[in-house]
Image: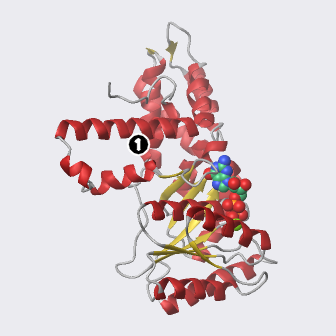
Amino acid sequence: MALFDRFKRKENSVSPTDADAEPDQAAAQSQDEEGGLLARFGQMLKKSRDLLKTDIRDLFKKEGELVDDEFLDKLFAKLVKTDMGAGPANVIRERVQQDNRGRIVQMDDVLLSVQDSLRQLMAQDAAPITFAASGPTVIMVVGVNGSGKTTSIAKLAYMFIAEGQRVVLGAGDTFRAAAVEQLTVWAHRIGAEIVTGKSGGDPASVAHRAVAQALETQADVCIIDTAGRLQTQVNLMQQLEKIRRVIGKLIPDAPHEVLLVLDATAGQNGISQAKGFSEAAGCTGIVLAKLDGTAKGGVVIPIRQQFQLPVKYIGLGEQADDLVLFDVDRFVKALFTDPESEGRGTTE
Ligand code: GDP
Ligand code: MG
């Protein structure tokens, strides 16, 4: 929860505490917050970091290493293991070569080139949720079964509620009874309202009632869960299209966001699966779930390159507050910063 407050406060910087704080104190606080966030990212990205940093460290002898073809090939092999794909790994290889060729270098020199290259490969502006100009903001969440949709919905709702907003959830995955139950449990836990339908019932009708309730009760946000698999892919796409249509009838510019949830542990495989999905459902952004459980953190790169969509949030665990706004600089820093040795509070 504190994590979201930090984002919010930083972006708006008009909370009473900030306005009253001495400039020095405010700067120290914000530095402290940044340190805390980095540490949090760092802990969650441990598997990817271990792979990147520890494996790259293994390439180095104490006295440094000559950057020749053999070294560059070994570096390439380590990079590919993060599931970033051969193309991007090659871009980084070339960058390291260009910066250091023929020199004897230390690990930190190489890491600088790697980090810079990673930042360029993932480049995007931070992309929080686009809110409706007035009335409820409607967010539809799509993705294959098991990718993390329902959990990500709970996390998003928790974030909005922590910011003082009222949230209505629509349990649109009526295909599986367990999915409705799961969302209901989350709704009670985090204090969101929920609209459900009969198991096997029409998800578009659930979506309709959820958005109608959000409108009537002047809720701030309405989030619609959807099925990840039906009898056929065509059925699924038609169902998503119908949900969109029904929502749009109630609020003409809704859904304001269609978030595609991808499972980071699926690596490159998950990406091709999700591609058809994103085109058919008119997605506006990606939530990359389960980055905590994988060493395949490099998968952000092909995702950024193959989808014309920003990565908006990343999932870093199974708890309600394990969702953070994706920020390229912070992400790259966390991939190389060991929270045990750095990122602790900076104030005395
Ligand atoms: P859905 O079928 O797309 O709705 O997926 P769920 O939300 O039910 O998630 C599938 C499984 O992944 C559940 O066991 C979740 O607890 C787990 N999960 C979801 N997001 C994350 C995450 O960011 N990190 C971890 N470690 N597990 C997650
Ligand atoms: Mg689900």
Up-down relation of residue 138 to residue 330 (above or below): below
Residue 15 vs residue 183: left or right? Answer: left
- Circle 1 crowding by C-alpha within 10 Å: few under 14, some 14–19, many from 20: some
Q: Residue 104's x, y, as percent?
A: 46, 13
Q: Which residue is mark 1?
A: 329
Q: Indicate the quadrant containing the C terminus: top left, top right, bottom left or bottom right.
A: top left
* Rendered position, 61 above or below 6: above
Please say which color scheme the image uses. Answer: secondary structure
In the current view of this chain or complex, which residue is farthest to the right? 231
Which secondary structure, mark 1? helix
The residue positioned 17% from the left and 40% from the top of the image is 23
Picture coordinates of residue 221 (x, y %)? Answer: 47, 74
Q: Position of residue 75 (x, y in %)?
A: 58, 27
Spot the residue most to the bottom.
Answer: 249
Quarter of the image where ligand 1 sits: bottom right
Observer able to see residue 344: yes
Q: Position of residue 12 (x, y in %)?
A: 28, 57
Left or right of 59 in this view: 66: left
Q: Is residue 109 above or below residue 164?
A: above
Image label count = 1
Please report the residue visible at 50 percent of the width from the left and 39 percent of the height from the top: 40
Residue drawn at x 63%, y 73% as measured from the top left: 225
Q: What amino acid is at disc 1? A: Asp
Query: For residue 105, what is the image quadrant?
Result: top left
Whether residue 117 is visible, yes or no, is no
Q: Residue at x 24, y 54 (%)?
A: 16
- Which residue is nearer to you in this view: 141 or 214? 214
- 6 on left or right of 47: left
